[in-house]
Image: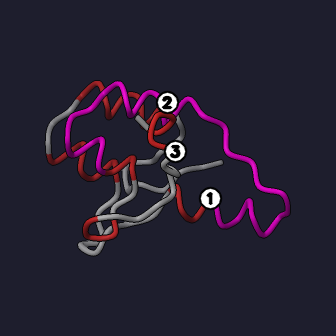
């Protein structure tokens, strides 16, 4: 979907959620896998810091993708997020 529609995984949409949070909320495991399997590298150190911030961002309710996965009790997505470096509070080590 991201590739087909030329969407950036960093775009914020409804309630300032990014594509990853939207996929978690919508239980779209295939999209979660697609987003987590990508490697995002910036041109400069500032770009890399911005990517790190965007990937660990919170929505307007201050909830992260990991938080949404726990709310929805999506064990497979929780495991994928942990494997991708997300911690329980939602921050991602990149």
Q: Is residue 3 above or below residue 94?
A: above
Crowd class of label 1 (few under 14; some 14 to 19; many from 20; radius 10 Å): some
Please report whichever mark, 3 or 2, sits nearer to the chain's N-terminal start: 3
Q: Magenta stretch: residue 24 in it?
A: yes
Give the distance between the C-alpha atoms of the residues marked 2 and 1, in whole angstroms: 16 Å
First to last magenta residue range: 22-51
Task: Name the foreground residue: 90 vs 36.
Answer: 36
**Quadrant showing the N terminus:** top left
Q: Position of residue 73 (x, y in %)?
A: 15, 36
Residue at the disc numbered 3: 6
Q: Is residue 89 left or right of residue 34?
A: left
Q: Are marks 2 and 1 in contact (CB under 8 Å)?
A: no
Q: Is residue 2 left or right of residue 64?
A: right
Q: Nearer the viewer, mark 2 or mark 1?
A: 1
Residue found 24% across the figure and 28% down from its top: 75
Q: Is residue 69 above or below residue 1?
A: below
Q: Nearer the viewer, mark 3 or mark 2?
A: 3
Q: Position of residue 59 (x, y in %)?
A: 32, 68
Give the distance between the C-alpha atoms of the residues marked 3 and 2, in whole angstroms: 26 Å
Q: Are marks 1 and 3 in contact (CB under 8 Å)?
A: no
Residue at the disc numbered 1: 52
Q: Is residue 56 left or right of residue 93?
A: left
Q: Quadrant of residue 12?
A: bottom left
Residue at the disc numbered 2: 83
Please report whichever mark, 2 or 1, sits nearer to the chain's N-terminal start: 1
Q: Quadrant of residue 80?
A: top left
Give the distance between the C-alpha atoms of the residues marked 1 and 3, in whole angstroms: 21 Å
Q: Magenta stretch: residue 35 in it?
A: yes
Please report whichever mark, 1 or 3, sits nearer to the chain's N-terminal start: 3
């Amino acid at each position: 979907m991201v590739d087909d529609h030329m969407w950036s995984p960093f775009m914020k949409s409804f309630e300032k959620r990014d594509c990853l949070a939207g996929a978690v909320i919508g239980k779209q495991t295939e999209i979660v896998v697609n987003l987590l399997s990508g490697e995002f590298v910036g041109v400069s150190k500032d770009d890399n810091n911005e990517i790190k911030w965007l990937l660990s961002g919170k929505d307007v309710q201050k909830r992260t993708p990991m938080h949404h996965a726990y709310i929805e009790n999506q064990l497979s997505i929780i495991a994928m997020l942990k494997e991708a470096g997300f911690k329980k509070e939602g921050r991602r080590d990149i």
